[in-house]
Amino acid sequence: MIQIMITKDVFETYTYFYVDKKTNHGFLIDPGAQADRILTYIAKKSWIIEKILLTHGHFDHTGAVDSIHRSLNIPYLIHENGKKYLEDVQWNLSAYCKRNVVLKEAEYLSDRDEIALEVNKDFSLKTIYTPGHTSDSVAFYSQKDKVAFVGDTIFKGTIGSTQYVGSNVQDLQNSIAKRIFRLPSEVTLYPGHSPSTTLA
Ligand SMILES: [Zn+2]
């Protein structure tokens, strides 16, 4: 089950809850802002969120991470190239918006890592490394549910921007052509700043 919450501080970001209906356990993807609102929603639903997953380290995807990580005592995971984004306010862009988002307790992911729920190993997401928008961008893909959380790599009707430190337009084109477009055509994509779309 996927639930969407549009969180807002400086920017609006699509925050996703990906929850296993059988166990009520799940993952929280890109909590961009409004930690209290997210925590209240999780409590109301009686979900057990096991992990926070980050598609990349820009602050509009991570602004609520520290509060939620502490409140729920759960880890947050990002691609191994995400360390410099999480720890550097220029790289994660928070410095340019008069914010100071610094995260130092991440756990790190590699391409093709499988992230499964503790209580149900069949409920999992695979990490697909998709650099370009940032050098730490990933998608989280479920073959079983035919969904992918793609961050800012691709949106409904357009592709991610490459104007930031760590961006690379050639990498973005390769990531989309060689990783995203090779997923089955019926997969639904859930981007960081637009409604869902399909590969088809
Ligand atoms: Zn971004």
Image (cartoon, rainbow, N blue to C red):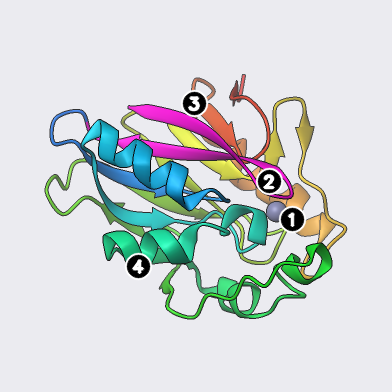
**Residue position for label 3:** 187
Q: Is 77 situated above or below 84?
A: above
Question: Is 104 within the magenta?
Answer: no
What type is the residue that disc 2 sits on? Thr
Packing grade of label 1 (10 A; few <14, some 14-19, many >=20) is: many
Packing grade of label 2 (10 A; few <14, some 14-19, many >=20) is: many
Look at the image and give the residue range highlighted in magenta: 1-20
* Label 1 with label 3: CB-CB less than 8 Å: no
List x then y, in percent, for residue 12: 68, 40
Is residue 27 toward the left or the right of residue 197 in the image?
Answer: left
Q: Secondary structure at mark 3?
A: loop
What type is the residue that disc 4 sits on? Arg
Q: Secondary structure at mark 4?
A: helix
Question: Is 4 within the magenta?
Answer: yes
**Residue position for label 2:** 153
Between discs 1 and 4, the one toward the N terminus = 4
Residue at disc 1, CB closer than 8 Å to ligand 1: yes
What is the spatial separation of the Cα atoms under label 1 and label 3, in whole angstroms?
21 Å
**Residue position for label 4:** 70
**Viewer-side residue, 49 vs 97:** 97
In this rendering, which labeled residue sits more in front, label 1 or label 4?
A: 4
**Residue position for label 1:** 133
In the picture, the quarter occupied by the N terminus is top left
Residue visible at 68% across and 37% down in the picture: 193
What type is the residue that disc 1 sits on? His
Q: Secondary structure at mark 1?
A: loop
